[in-house]
Image: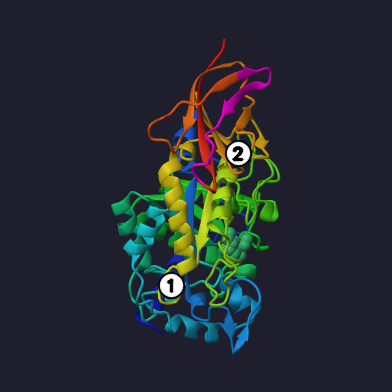
Amino acid sequence: MTRKGIFVIVLAVIAAQTMPVPGEDACSLNELPAETKHQRDARMRWWRDARFGMFIHWGAYAIPAGTYKGKRIDGLGEWIMDTAKIPIDEYETFVTQFNPARFDANEWVRVAANAGIKYIVITSKHHDGFCLWDSKVSDHDIMDAAPFRRDVLKELAAACRKKGIKLCFYYSIMDWHHPDARGENFPKYRDYYMKPQIKELLTSYGDIGVMWFDGEWIKEWTEPQGKELFNYVRGLRPTIIVNNRVGKGRKGMEGMNKAEGYAGDFGTPEQQIPPTGFPGLDWESCMTMNDTWGYKSYDNNWKSSETLIHNLIDIVSKGGNFLLNVGPTAEGLIPGPSVECLTAMGEWMKVNGEAIYATTASEHGQGEWGRFTEKPGKTFAHVFNWPKTGTLAVPLKDTQVSRAYMLADKTRNLLRVDKTQDGVLLYLPETAPDAIASVVVIEYRKQR
Ligand code: FHN
């Protein structure tokens, strides 16, 4: 038993003697805090403006990388402990091999920033319970159990601060490693392990933008506990944003809440883009670049940069955020194909970011040729399929168009605009400035 292990037991004994372990659902503060629309809009502002984030699934599962005892294991890379039914003591041998010698937080953040990404959500602790930071209440962490002995979250926090990228933490409520994280002992895990860890995460690494909970589907977790956890997190960092997997509101992979009143600030559609937006609701689609969140050495089913750019535009045109995943290798490298796609996305964003950042969903619906995003007095038409007619009909009614131009055209050559009974007809250049998506800017004033 390590020094820290003895310390943790002593701590738990003292705590158990001095503080009654609350019952299953005996949660203090399980009502959501009152917040005006103005206060909530202010809290959500940076996240709504950001529109584009990076998910990072990284941990001991990158060691087997989808293969166990010589067999390729179906399913998600980060689920291998469960899918291959690996005993805890055997899975811990992966942790003792976790020594990512090529990990460079500054390089990860450079790749993200170069892609036009504004926030990073990293798996501080996934379902396997392995912690990527120096946790005072656990030995199952990168400082005690792995030979790496560097606090990954500390290095990532410093790199994010340097580049102005918001750092956010994913934390799994479900924990396959901790002996009390199931059954009647769950309140002990919740109160003397999970919440102290969340406090460590929110008080040791500077400003944290989002707590991204997951693994909430376990039977031990309830909405009252979710509300209490939401309040606990907001009590530690009042301006933090929390996803809807803090409670039990989520409708499966569809990701939105089944009703009003559930804890959490935004819905979390997973591996899908809703057919329409959700006026008045915040949501974020999280998606992989191949078919797995955690690294698998043989998953090379990469989406094209065209698909990823179209996904970003589609999601933002419906008022959502895009959280795009990378699964770094056991060495600490973001896979090459991921970097290539992110670089291509960044090239597009350098020219067209104005049509993505701080935009809102469009009431113009979706054209079969592309999508619309909006800013006050500006409509951005993202044209995927360049019209053979050379014209584009835009249903802008009750408006006076002051000018229209291609966002990629630095000289702002004005396009011809004809009023029609259904809106306006734009006359486009002969060739599209961008093969993937070309943005037409239409500036207008609303007519009284
Ligand atoms: O089980 C996890 C999975 O491993 C991954 O982390 C995704 C990402 O949103 N969330 C859960 C599945 O919904």
Eyeballing the image, is 313 above or below 302?
Answer: above
Is any atom of residue 28 visible in this view? Answer: no
Q: Is mark 1 within 8 Å of ligand 1?
A: no
Secondary element under disc 1, as helix, strand or loop, is loop
Disc 2 packing (10 Å; few <14; some 14–19; many ≥20): many
The residue to which callout 1 is attached is 138
The residue to which callout 2 is attached is 371
**Quarter residue 185 falls in:** bottom right
The N terminus lies in quadrant: bottom left
Q: CA distance from mark 2 to mark 1?
A: 48 Å
In primary-sequence order, the first of circles 2 and 1 is: 1
Q: Is residue 27 magenta?
A: no
Please report the residue visible at 28 percent of the width from the left and 53 percent of the height from the top. 162
Is there CB contact under 8 Å for labels 2 and 1?
A: no
| Rendered location of residue 390, percent (x, y) | 60, 33
Instruction: State the extent of the magenta-drawn residues as a range.
Output: 419-434
Disc 1 packing (10 Å; few <14; some 14–19; many ≥20): many
Side (left or right) of 145 relative to 365: left
Q: Amino acid at mark 2?
A: Arg
Q: Is residue 432 magenta?
A: yes
Eyeballing the image, is 353 above or below 304?
Answer: above
| Rendered location of residue 274, percent (x, y) | 67, 46
Q: Amino acid at mark 1?
A: Ser
